Image: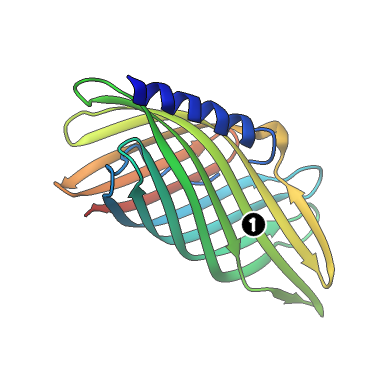
Amino acid sequence: MKRIVYANIFTIIILSCLLTTSFSAPCYGIKTPQKKRIFLGTQTHYIIHRNLENNYGKVRSLQHFLLLSWGITDWLSLDLKGGTGYIKQHPYNSDEIDYNSSFAGGYGFRIKIWEDETATTKTVFGFQHISVHPYSSDINGVNYKAVLDDWQVSLLISKNLDNITPYLGTKWSRIDYINWINDKRERIMSDLTKSLGIIIGLDYQLRKNIWLNMETHFLDEKAGSIAIMFAL
């Protein structure tokens, strides 16, 4: 009981801090490692469509990651990732700007807020951040450079059905498209009227310590991810 109370207090504090600054990244699913245990995996995340503010058009991105989750406690895990990703930004009334794949990375954490006595139903709160740093692009003598910052807080609830664990949740997310045209820098945010989203996902147990995670995002963006995870 004390663990649940402390987790709820910690969640309220984190939410208060994050929602007053900036905030879509995959949620890593509902499975969290126990204390001093590690999950490893590979993941592909595709942002199909995300609207930018004002008349800046839309952005999309494909990312590939190696994942690591470490159980700090039985109810708190640290999530890290590293890999590659590209950005494609399509302004209104202009051709799409393509930035070829280069480094991408991310970090976050998840808190197991509640779990029933049979461990079949649980609720998890998470925070995730991804940053994509593709190569610059030269178009007609103009140098374009960009960074994509992807922020998200989420709340998920799941139901374990033997080998399949579906989950449903909501999230608050934001993307910052930071771009340079030659030496002129500009930060463009995603459409803040479309920051609240829905998450639908599932974990499918392949073997005792291996599972497949699939996830889709709606409303704030069109995006999806797939990962294969290993428990050590």
Q: Nearer the viewer, residue 30 or 57?
A: 30
Instruction: Name the quadrant containing residue 114.
Output: top left
Q: Position of residue 54 (x, y in %)?
A: 81, 42
Quadrant in which the N terminus appears: top left
Q: Position of residue 170 (x, y in %)?
A: 50, 29
Residue that badge 1 annotates: 148
Q: In the orientation shown, which residue stands out farthest toward the right?
A: 184
Q: Is residue 59 above or below residue 153?
A: below
Q: Is residue 210 above or below residue 170?
A: below
Q: Tell me what residue is drawn at x 63 percent, y 34 percent.
A: 17
Q: In the orientation shown, which residue stands out farthest toward the bottom?
A: 141
Instruction: Name the quadrant containing residue 192.
Output: top right
Q: Tell me what residue is drawn at x 19 percent, y 22 percent.
A: 118
Q: Is residue 125 above or below residue 117?
A: below
Q: Nearer the viewer, residue 70 or 53?
A: 70
Q: Is residue 221 left or right of residue 217?
A: right
Q: Nearer the viewer, residue 15 or 31?
A: 15
Q: In the orientation shown, which residue stands out farthest toward the front?
A: 2
Q: Is residue 182 above or below residue 127?
A: below
Secondary structure state at the residue bearing disc 1: strand
Q: Tell me what residue is drawn at x 46 percent, y 53 percent.
A: 45
Q: How is the image coloured?
A: rainbow
Q: Position of residue 227 (x, y in %)?
A: 35, 52
Say how many tags the image has. Answer: 1
Q: Tell me what residue is drawn at x 63 percent, y 45 percent.
A: 50
- Residue type at mark 1 is Leu
Q: Is residue 118 left or right of residue 15?
A: left
Q: Position of residue 10 (x, y in %)?
A: 49, 30
Mark 1 packing: few (<14 Cα in 10 Å), some, or many (20+)? many
Quadrant in which the C terminus appears: bottom left
